[in-house]
Image (spheres, grey):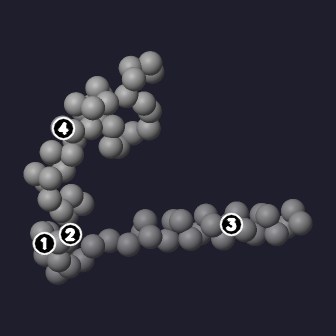
Amino acid sequence: MRIAGVALLVALAGLSTGCAATAVKPWDRDLLAKKQMRLIHQPMLNAVDDHVYFSKEGSTGGMDAGGGGCGCN
């Protein structure tokens, strides 16, 4: 049982580091710079949503981090 756990841990570590070694080729960077590849597709709509969350919760940045908006942190 212990060997299986160690083997699983090694396999997960190998899989998690496999993507970190890849680099974006210069001829592929134009694809990543397209509008469709943005993390936030509609910046104005996202700004309105942030304003609504700020107004209702009394907190800023509630979209990215955990925690409540009650001010008790």
Q: Are marks 2 and 1 in contact (CB under 8 Å)?
A: yes
Where 9 sits versus 68, above or below? Answer: below
Left/right of residue 56 with respect to residue 51 in the rendered view: right
Label 3 or label 2, whichever lies nearer to me, is 2
Circle 3 residue:
10
Circle 1 residue:
34
Q: Secondary structure at mark 2?
A: helix
Circle 2 residue:
37
Q: Secondary structure at mark 1?
A: loop
Q: Position of residue 58 (x, y in %)?
A: 29, 26
**Residue 33 or 62: which is nearer the viewer?**
62
- Specify the quadrant that holds the C terminus: top left
- Taking the view exactly as shown, the residue that stands out farthest to the right is 1
Left/right of residue 6 with respect to residue 69 in the rendered view: right
Displayed quadrant of residue 29: bottom left
Q: Are marks 4 and 3 in contact (CB under 8 Å)?
A: no
**Residue 13 or 36: which is nearer the viewer?**
36
Where 45 sits versus 33, above or below? Answer: above
Three-letter code for the amino acid on which mark 4 is drawn: His
Circle 4 residue:
51
Displayed quadrant of residue 41: bottom left
Three-letter code for the amino acid on which mark 2 is drawn: Met
Q: Residues within 10 Å of mark 1 (few under 14, many from 20)?
A: few
Mark 1 or mark 4: whose residue is earlier in sequence? 1
Mark 3 or mark 1: whose residue is earlier in sequence? 3
Label 1 or label 4, whichever lies nearer to me, is 4
Q: Separation of disc 3 and disc 1 at Cα?
A: 37 Å
